[in-house]
């Protein structure tokens, strides 16, 4: 059992190698954790901020699929002073041995990085995903883990039974000890004290260090590679494995109008878009502004946004964006976007360095970085026309433009004083 010390030493592995195939075309040239979110963040910033705010600052980011955009973001946004040797966010690729050229799964990724755990000798190891939008005080999960003398703790989100088939479901007893796992079941087993909801795994785990090391060595011998499918179900039969109820987590500074246990797996284009809509409005269900629990990101040094006439209704503008005599509703525009006169933008997510020409009309769309929308273009009004133009249209009717030509930005220098870009 874990010796109670009052302040356990915790290090973290963040699983950031996901391909995010259901987010294509946004993930055609970048991994899912590197996909931009909101007016200034990347998806990975949320888990890293939660760990940093929870005083867990020895963080290894395990990368694999198209990691360069993520690596550049970490280099520019997450550099920590060298004065503190145990404060860092370090990128770790597959070890590329003769036996294995990549990570075989989540458990194999951490197994290949066990030497890093041996260097730091932590009491506890957090293994968290990098794919979700949420706030979480991980210290409260650590406290729960220690109070229950757990070997492993799995963060669990209560979800309505009619939505349980979308998640990996955890079965527990009344005390929260895990009895079994169900992978996207048609009929989920409800929580012991709530017949209307079931526990969904959030993909965030806390291990006693010795338990993790032993479990991964055994998994490697057995040819097992995944935490959810292999390691955790086996450990639940032999060790003290508990579910931590995320709905009990209290984050300082959360406003009364927010969804207290907000957590979104932005795994599809439609859910990714819906999560953006969640940050809009005067009382959003997820307010990105919280000085007591900030979401850290880029140290961008560009100028503020400018609006030269126009009609804006429920809009977030990124830095150095210019809006000139345009109409924008229910939309987010990230940094260094140019919107020319007469353009109309409704229910859209416009990523960095996009130029929207005069009179263009965009509706229910995501426009990835470095696109130039020519004057008079219509997107989102005729889906057959959108598909004919080569745009991706989801089942929910969302139109998505892939990454544009970065050379355009470099060539034009953009009208907003380029050179600030990352």
Image (cartoon, helix red, strand yellow):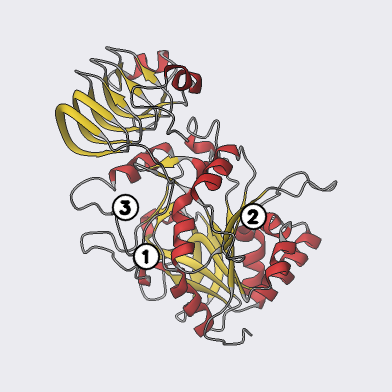
Position of residue 161 relative to residue 407, above or below, is: below
Q: Pinpoint residue 375: horizontal percent, then vertical percent.
A: 29, 12
Residue annotated with mark 2? 106
Residue situated in front as seen by the camera: 89 or 410 = 410
Q: Earlier in the sequence, mark 3 or mark 1?
A: 1
Q: Nearer the viewer, mark 3 or mark 1?
A: 3
Q: Pinpoint residue 404: horizontal percent, then vertical percent.
A: 46, 22
Question: Which residue shows up at 32% across the image and 33% down it?
Answer: 320
Q: Earlier in the sequence, mark 2 or mark 1?
A: 2
The picture quadrant where one finds residue 218 is bottom right
Question: Mark 3: few, some, or many residues within 10 Å (few <14, many ≥20)?
Answer: some
The picture quadrant where one finds residue 227 is bottom right
Residue situated in front as seen by the camera: 219 or 298 = 298
Q: Pinpoint residue 287: horizontal percent, then vertical percent.
A: 28, 54
Identity of the residue furthest to the front in this view: 83
Name the element at disc 3. loop
Question: Which residue shows up at 77% across the image and 60% down it?
Answer: 220
Q: Is residue 319 visible?
A: yes
For residue 288, the mark is: 3
Q: Are marks 3 and 2 in contact (CB under 8 Å)?
A: no
Q: Earlier in the sequence, mark 3 or mark 2?
A: 2
Between the residue at mark 3 and the residue at mark 2, the CA separation in whole angstroms equals: 29 Å
Residue annotated with mark 1? 197
Left or right: where 388 falls relative to 242: left
């Amino acid at each position: 059992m874990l010796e109670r010390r009052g302040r356990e030493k915790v290090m973290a592995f963040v699983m950031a190698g996901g391909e995010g195939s259901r987010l294509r075309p946004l993930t055609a040239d970048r991994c899912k954790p590197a996909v931009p979110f909101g007016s200034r963040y990347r998806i990975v910033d949320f888990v890293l901020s939660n760990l940093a705010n929870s005083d867990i600052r020895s963080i290894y980011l395990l990368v694999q699929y198209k990691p360069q955009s993520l690596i550049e973001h970490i280099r520019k946004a997450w550099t920590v002073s060298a004065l503190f040797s145990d404060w860092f966010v370090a990128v770790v690729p597959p070890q590329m041995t003769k036996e294995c050229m990549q990570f075989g799964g989540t458990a194999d990724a951490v197994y290949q990085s066990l030497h890093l755990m041996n260097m730091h000798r932590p009491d506890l190891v957090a293994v968290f995903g990098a794919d979700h939008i949420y706030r979480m005080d991980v210290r409260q999960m650590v406290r729960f883990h220690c109070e229950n003398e757990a070997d492993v703790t799995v963060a669990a989100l209560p979800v309505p039974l009619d939505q349980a088939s979308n998640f990996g479901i955890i079965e527990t007893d009344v005390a929260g000890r895990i009895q079994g796992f169900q992978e996207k079941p048609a009929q989920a087993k409800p929580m012991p004290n709530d017949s209307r909801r079931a526990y969904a795994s959030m993909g965030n785990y806390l291990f006693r260090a010795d338990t993790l090391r032993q479990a991964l060595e055994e998994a490697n011998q057995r040819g097992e590679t995944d935490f959810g499918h292999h390691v955790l179900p086996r450990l639940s039969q032999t060790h003290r494995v508990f579910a931590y109820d995320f709905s009990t987590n209290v984050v300082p500074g959360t406003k009364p109008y927010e969804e207290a246990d907000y957590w979104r797996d932005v795994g599809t284009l439609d859910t990714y878009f819906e999560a953006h809509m969640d940050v809009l409005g005067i009382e959003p269900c997820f307010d990105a502004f919280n000085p007591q629990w900030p979401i850290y990101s880029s140290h961008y040094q560009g100028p503020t946004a400018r609006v030269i006439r126009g009609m804006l209704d429920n809009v977030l503008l990124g830095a150095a964006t210019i809006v000139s005599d345009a109409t924008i509703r229910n939309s987010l525009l990230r940094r260094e976007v140019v919107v020319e006169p007469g353009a109309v933008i409704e229910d859209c997510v416009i990523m960095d360095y996009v130029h929207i020409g005069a009179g263009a009309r965009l509706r229910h769309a995501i426009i990835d970085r470095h696109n130039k929308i020519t004057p008079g273009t219509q997107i989102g009004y005729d889906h057959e026309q959108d598909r004919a133009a080569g745009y991706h249209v989801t089942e929910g009717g969302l139109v998505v433009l892939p990454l544009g030509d970065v050379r355009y930005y470099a060539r034009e220098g953009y009208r907003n004083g380029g050179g600030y870009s990352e």
